[in-house]
Image (cartoon, rainbow, N blue to C red):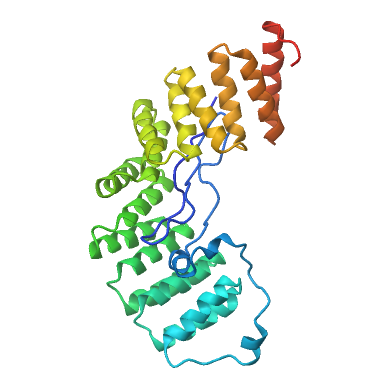
Amino acid sequence: MNHTVNLGRNFPSTTDFFFSSHRESGRCLILHPLVKAALSGYLFVLVLALNGCLDRPSQKTSLVNTDQASQPQEFADSTGYRQRALKSFKDGNLSWAIADYQKAIALDPANPRLYVELASLWGKQKDYNKMIEVCRQGVERVPEDATLRLQLGNAYSAADFLPQAIESYQRALTINPKETDAYFNIGLAYDKSYNYASAVQAYEKVLELRPRDAEAHCNLAAIFLLRGKNDKAIEHCSKAVEIDPKDPDAYYNLGLAHYRSGRYAQAAQAYEKALELKPDMDEGYYNLALALEKTKEFKGSVKAWQEYLKQTGNEDGVKVAVAHIITITREHHLEGH
């Protein structure tokens, strides 16, 4: 059977805001797709400006401020338009925000932050062609801004133009060799391209510059799992959970690495910790059940299978779970299950 690998961070990151974190999912006993959901957000500057407004539900369109709609104020410089754009974004009115950013850029075309933030809004709407277009306009105006190059790489990555993304990230690094997130995002791009050797090099560079980057450790662990290097995976998973003890994916991967190494009791402990942090992780129950079977904790195994059945929609997984429950209860004379 295949085991799933839960990779660390699956969205490009930037210097100011780490998008959504928990990267990609690989293969396991119950299969995740290799790449988790798509883009979670490129709104790193906006998030800082709005003090966490991204936690609010976003809408493509919302009620327009009637005062603003009837008497739109004009500004003499870009700052007024940018501030109003940030407020519109906070209120969920992306169309107004985009319009004001365009006016701000017209007044201040050499301000890279405006291009980065406008590109973020197009990314929020999943219009990656527009996102790329805005970033390229900005790069033409301000070619030596590392953050703008980084955002252009994010736009290319979101559109799955991975060679162009890598090139843009590398250009950001020529401008600022300590742009750690560019190395991280190069790792992601290589990872998505199945070029694991290059991805490992990129993540190791991240750790040179930022040794306590839990997501880099988690992503390295996932690659080592995919390549069958379980001891290396355990090393990096252990470091990841030391740095970030609230990360269920790191514990899950730690369990997987222990399981593949024949350390079934340690695997069960790691899966239990992952499920404590993320109780709706159905594949965690699946793998926990298998690990507990290996340690002959059959009652616990049946309970884990039953929890798995409550959560999963995987038909093949249901068949496997039912078969295990029947076999265990018959062979080990368990009653009440």
Question: In the figure, 98 relative to 29: above or below?
Answer: below
Image quadrant in which you'd find residue 319: top right
Q: Residue furthest front?
A: 51
Task: Identify the residue at horizontal 49%, vertical 69% (top origin).
Answer: 50
Image quadrant in which you'd find residue 315: top right
Expressed as whole percent of the image width and height from the top left, the position of residue 308 reads 66, 29
Residue closest to the eye, 179 or 334: 334
State which quarter of the image contains the N terminus: top right
Expressed as whole percent of the image width and height from the top left, the position of residue 325 reads 69, 17
Q: Left or right: 165 with respect to 317?
A: left
State which quarter of the image contains the C terminus: top right
Residue 94 seen: yes
Expressed as whole percent of the image width and height from the top left, the position of residue 322 reads 71, 21
Task: Identify the residue at horizontal 61%, vertical 36% (top origin).
Answer: 279
Expressed as whole percent of the image width and height from the top left, the position of residue 29 reads 56, 28
Residue closest to the eye, 9 or 280: 280
Question: In the figure, 43 relative to 296: above or below?
Answer: below
Label count reads 0
Question: In the figure, 75 relative to 232: above or below?
Answer: below
Q: Left or right: 331 with respect to 8?
A: right
Image quadrant in which you'd find residue 222: top left
Q: Residue furthest right?
A: 336
Residue 3 seen: no
